[in-house]
Image (cartoon, grey):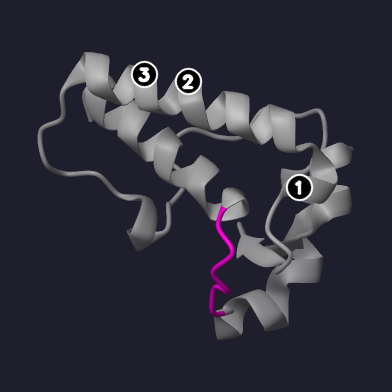
């Protein structure tokens, strides 16, 4: 993954909580989510090369400047929205549910 692809990947991740689209839950999320939440959401840095959702993968070539500008716009929109301005639907990321409260912590 090059830098432009990484920016596009991050942009897709910011799109999830800013969208009003309901995302489906995966069966593994429902079964094992509670077991891994405390290991992923603490002060310990995440390990490298953790798997990512297929909807966040970027394999095609991207324009660095365009992706950088669009990501900055998403970050500003996310910050301006605040915890209550994100999607009304909780969504699964890394085997756990993220809600309005998750973003304010």
Q: Residue at x 25, y 31 (%)?
A: 5
Q: Name the residue that disc number 2 marks.
A: 72
Q: Residue at x 83, y 49 (%)?
A: 84
Q: Secondary structure at mark 2?
A: helix
Q: Name the residue that disc number 1 marks.
A: 85
- Quarter of the image with the C terminus is top right
Closest to the observer, 86 or 64: 86
User: Spatial distance from mark 1 to mark 2, Cα to Cα?
Assistant: 18 Å
Vertical placement of 9 versus 2: above or below?
Answer: below
Given contact means CB atoms under 8 Å apart, are the residues at marks 3 and 2 in contact? yes
User: Spatial distance from mark 3 to mark 1, Cα to Cα?
Assistant: 22 Å
**What secondary structure prevails in the magenta region?**
loop
Given contact means CB atoms under 8 Å apart, are the residues at marks 1 and 2 in contact? no
Q: Name the residue that disc number 3 marks.
A: 69
Q: Residue at x 24, y 44 (%)?
A: 58
Q: Secondary structure at mark 3?
A: helix
| Horizontal and vertical percent position of residue 26 | 55, 80
Look at the image and give the residue range highlighted in magenta. Answer: 19-24
Closest to the observer, 39 or 8: 8
């Amino acid at each position: 993954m090059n830098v432009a692809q990484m920016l596009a990947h991050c942009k897709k991740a910011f799109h999830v909580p800013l969208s009003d689209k309901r995302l489906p839950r995966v069966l593994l999320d429902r079964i094992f989510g509670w077991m891994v939440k405390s290991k992923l959401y603490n002060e310990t840095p995440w390990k490298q090369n953790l798997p990512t959702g297929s909807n966040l993968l970027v394999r095609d070539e991207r324009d660095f400047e365009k992706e950088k500008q669009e990501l900055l716009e998403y970050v500003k929109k996310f910050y301006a929205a605040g915890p209550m301005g994100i999607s009304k639907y909780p969504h699964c990321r890394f085997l756990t549910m993220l809600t309005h409260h998750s973003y304010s912590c």
